[in-house]
Image (tube, rainbow, N blue to C red):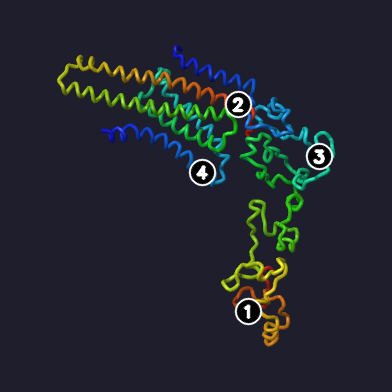
Amino acid sequence: MRNPLQILAWLLVLAAAAAVWFRPQALVEPGDLMPAHRSLAVDCLACHEPLRGVPDARCTGCHALADIGLVTTRGDTIRERGTAVAFHQGLAHPQCTACHSDHRGVQAYRPVQTFRHGLLAGDVVNLCAGCHVRPQDGFHASLGDDCAACHDTGDWRRARFDHARWFRFDRHHPATCATCHPAGAAAGYTCYGCHEHSRAGIRAEHLEEGIRDFEDCARCHRSGDEHEAERRMRDGGARRDDD
Amino acid sequence: MHRSLLRREILPFLFSFLALILFTILIDAALHRAGLVAVGRWLGIPGTVLILASFGYSARKRKLIRRGGAKAWLRSHEVLAWTGVLLVLVHAGVHVHAPLPWLALGAMLINVLSGLTGTWLLQRSRRRLEARREDYRAQGLSEAEAESRLAWDAVSYSLMRKWRTVHLPITVVCGGLALIHVASVLLLWGWR
């Protein structure tokens, strides 16, 4: 090997290997460790195991699941308890690195949103309010705790609520919540207030037909089609699809 | 003349490199769109295997392998290395966290540019040699005279030799850094 460039190349590789061996944090560390773990910065194998990465046992050795959010690793009681840590006690299969990346470089690319609800045991997964703050709008305030009736954990923002089960929208009855739910409450609604839907007019029209129970309009009128109620009555009475 | 130089020599050289970058972006975007980003991380393995397989050409040249023609081995070297580098680029495109993978990636790209330059020099030498030989024959020169005049062909070959003195060290740096990267991943990464 007389080529001086080749000798230089081998020297460069050897220097890189030596740097990785003696100061791994300089070349292979994906960003600084989080402040609480800074003392481990020069000891990669404090958390990493050859071929196994960071086994959960290395984390739970210091952070017992039963203590997370309640007691610090030094044994001090945590006074300000956040809702976001309560689920740790309900984890069926702890997989710490699925959510936590202690190196700042990784954290930027893999934030904690990668939490999988499948890790939660049994009924804990249904206790949404244990970790999530209920939406503050009037619509959600009027609903119960069964979030899963409309939402799933795959895509929280996209609800699968099917309004057509109660009332189908059309161009005269657009999907503007406040028109029918003026208080923002989902459970209650009103049809009064729009053009001929006055309480007195509706009362007179229904009494003329011998209908005395007409307060729950959508029970018979499932859309803007005024003849639909007649057809439904003829076909066996007014029933909800889910009755 | 200038147009011919651009079309026959410069454009294929640029096309090969730009196609590499373009395919990397397209595959990376497709993986992100399909929610298969994690697949990209594993592409480093087949990519490395293909690059290692491309060294069959070097083994053939040093007669460690005796089967197959040199031209076919050279073509396999180009195709396997290009494809392997594409997979490694997609693997790296997912995200590079630490300085060492960045260095290995940079060395690999320099190696690719160097390899493409070598391909370009070789094709150029061949074309010039053949053109000159025909030229001398047309002039009615004897084979011996033609050969002596073809002494300039040493220029071409010495150019290739000079290129090799640069390409091999770049390959050593690229391979060495990649090896350290793989070793550190084996040591620290969780295979799950």
Examine the rendered structure and indicate whether residue A158 appears above or below residue A190.
Answer: above
**Amino acid at pointer 3:** Asp
The C terminus of chain A lies in quadrant = bottom right
Badge 1 and badge 2 both on one subunit: yes
Q: Position of residue A109 (x, y in %)?
A: 61, 40
Circle 3 SS class: helix
Circle 4 SS class: helix
- Chain ID, mark 1: A
- Chain ID, mark 2: A
**Amino acid at pointer 1:** His
Residue on which the image places disc 1:
A195
In this orientation, which residue lies closer to the viewer: A124 or B163? B163
Marks 3 and 1, the one that precedes in the sequence: 3
Residue A227 image label: none
Residue A67 image label: 3
Residue on which the image places disc 2:
A27
Residue on which the image places disc 4:
B29
A241 relative to B151 in the view: left or right: right
**Amino acid at pointer 2:** Leu
* Mark pair 1, 2: CA separation: 73 Å
Marks 1 and 2, the one that precedes in the sequence: 2
Q: Position of residue B68 (x, y in %)?
A: 37, 24
